[in-house]
Image: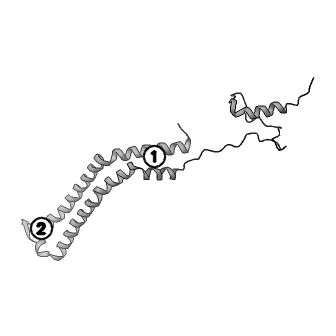
Amino acid sequence: MEKHDGREVAQTRAGDRGVLGDPWYDALASGWGELDGTGAPALAVPPQAAPPERSAAAIYLEVQRSAAFQEVRSRYRRFVIPAAAAFFAWYLAYILAATTAPGLMGRPVAGAVNVAMLAGLGQFLSTFLLTWLYSRHARLRRDRAALELRWDTQEMTRMIEGGQR
């Protein structure tokens, strides 16, 4: 009858651990007191390569480079730049006319109402009109795509913060 100290079984089992996928195999308990090939104690749990984690900054950069984000930004620019330029030109024309053409601005239109008062009221009306046009453009052309991007980004960042829910 032969005596076995159990090392052969443990070494065989440690070598088969990846192949068998034994659900009853306790990785934390294995290797205690066992020796690796060099004679040093074996690690209880073999080191595994950690999956590369994506940071929130990397996710936001990825979204920023996406075609959907670029489309939302270009729609925004196609409206805002011309609208801001037109509004600024209108405001500048009002200021220049008020300072350089006082005779024109002081000309009466109806009773005590003159051109300067109508132009000033026109500034208020154009501000309200531009605000309405901007909100309409955003609602019709950008909000849905921006909301989808926001949901996708939140889902991606939620996965790195707390895992899948």
Residue at (73, 35) in percent of width and height = 27
Residue at (30, 50) in percent of width and height = 138
Rendering coords of residue 18 (x, y %): 69, 34
Quarter location, residue 105:
bottom left
Vertical comparison of 130 with 112: above or below: above
Rendering coords of residue 136 (x, y %): 26, 49
Secondary-structure class at tag 1: helix
Nearest to the observer: residue 114 or residue 162: 162
In the image, taking residue 148 as reference, residue 34 lies left or right, namely right
Name the amino acid, label 1.
Thr
Q: Which residue is mark 2?
A: 115
Callout 1 crowding tier (Cα within 10 Å): few <14, some 14–19, many ≥20: some
Vertical comparison of 49 with 104: above or below: above
Secondary-structure class at tag 2: helix
Q: Which residue is the extreme one toward the bottom?
A: 100
Rendering coords of residue 65 (x, y %): 43, 53
Nearest to the observer: residue 127 or residue 52: 52
Name the amino acid, label 2.
Val
